[in-house]
């Protein structure tokens, strides 16, 4: 018996269905999720050993979704005085 069958009673078709639903729901976010998980795995030992401080610059501190987007394509905040730009 496999782990999934033993603890959850799931067969191969149920596991495939869960994977397909996960990809459909989180498809666009999967690269970001992988990046964050990879960084956390590599940063955790550094944090534990005290090698990584708060002053370490990150390239995604401002907006993780805007990496590589030219400034002319980034949305501008709305003006509060009602005038058009």
Image (cartoon, rainbow, N blue to C red):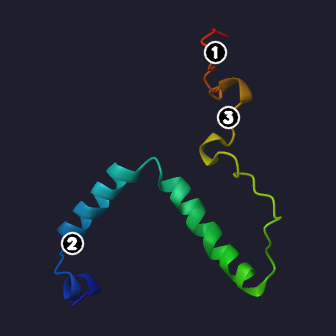
Work out how far the residue at label 1 is from the one at label 2, CA to CA, in angstroms.
Answer: 58 Å
User: Are discs 1 and 3 less than 8 Å apart at CB?
Assistant: no
**Is 64 situated above or below 42?**
above
Work out how far the residue at label 2 is from the one at label 3, CA to CA, in angstroms.
Answer: 40 Å
Pointer 2 or 3: first along the chain: 2
* Residue at left offset 41%, top offset 50%: 27
Pointer 1 or 2: first along the chain: 2
- Observer-nearest residue: 21 or 40? 40
Work out how far the residue at label 1 is from the one at label 3, CA to CA, in angstroms.
Answer: 28 Å
Mark 3 lies on residue = 69
Q: Quadrant of residue 12?
A: bottom left
* Residue at left offset 26%, top offset 63%: 18
- Observer-nearest residue: 12 or 37? 37
Q: Which circle marks residue 12 in the picture?
A: 2
* Residue at left offset 67%, top offset 34%: 69
Location of residue 39 in the rendering, given as x and y in whole percent from the top left corner: 64, 67
State left or right for residue 51 relative to residue 2: right
| Local SS, label 1 | loop
**CA neighbours of label 1 inside 10 A, class few (<14), some (14 to 19), many (20+):** few
Pointer 1 or 3: first along the chain: 3
Mark 1 lies on residue = 81
Location of residue 64 in the rendering, given as x and y in whole percent from the top left corner: 63, 48
């Amino acid at each position: 018996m496999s782990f999934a069958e033993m603890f959850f009673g799931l067969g191969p078709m149920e596991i495939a269905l869960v994977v397909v639903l996960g990809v459909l729901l989180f498809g666009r976010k999967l690269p970001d999720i992988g990046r964050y998980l990879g960084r956390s795995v590599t940063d955790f030992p550094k944090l534990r050993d005290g090698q990584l401080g708060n002053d370490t610059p990150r390239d995604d501190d401002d907006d993780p979704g805007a990496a590589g987007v030219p400034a002319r394509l980034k949305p501008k905040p709305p003006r509060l005085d009602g005038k058009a730009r």
